[in-house]
Amino acid sequence: MSPIVAFLPSHLVQLGFDYVLAVGAEDDATAARLAPEVEQLPGLLPAIAELVVFPVTALADDSERPNPSPVGR
């Protein structure tokens, strides 16, 4: 885990999410407004990804997945 994670105040998490959402929504004006602040904190987006994106999107290996129930039984 990155060293910045332990010191990530909620307003920085909000800033990071606002920036990512603006970029994802192609809201160039908002992304441009937030970019200077985000760029001053180079570890911000990776730290947020470590906290949220990686755990949520981590895939279980095949041994941990339940067998799907047959359809139509």
Image (cartoon, rainbow, N blue to C red):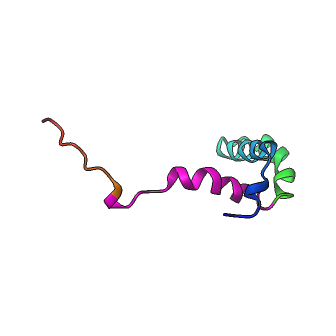
64 is higher (above) or lower (below) than 13: below
**Quadrant of image for the N terminus:** bottom right
Magenta residues (range): 42-63
Is residue 23 or residue 62 the one in the foreground? 62
Q: Residue 52: x percent and y percent?
A: 61, 50
Q: Residue 40: x percent and y percent?
A: 87, 58
- Could you tell me which residue is drawn at 73 percent across and 57 percent down? 5
Dividing the picture into quadrants, the one containing residue 69 is top left
- Residue most toward the top? 72
Tell me, yes or no, whether the highlighted magenta stretch contains residue 45.
Answer: yes
- Residue most toward the left? 73
**Quadrant of image for the C terminus:** top left
Is residue 63 or residue 11 the one in the foreground? 63
- Residue most toward the bottom? 2
Q: Residue 43: x percent and y percent?
A: 77, 61
Q: Is residue 22 left or right of residue 54?
A: right
Q: Residue 20: x percent and y percent?
A: 69, 47
Tell me, yes or no, whether the highlighted magenta stretch contains residue 50.
Answer: yes
Q: Is residue 62 left or right of residue 1?
A: left
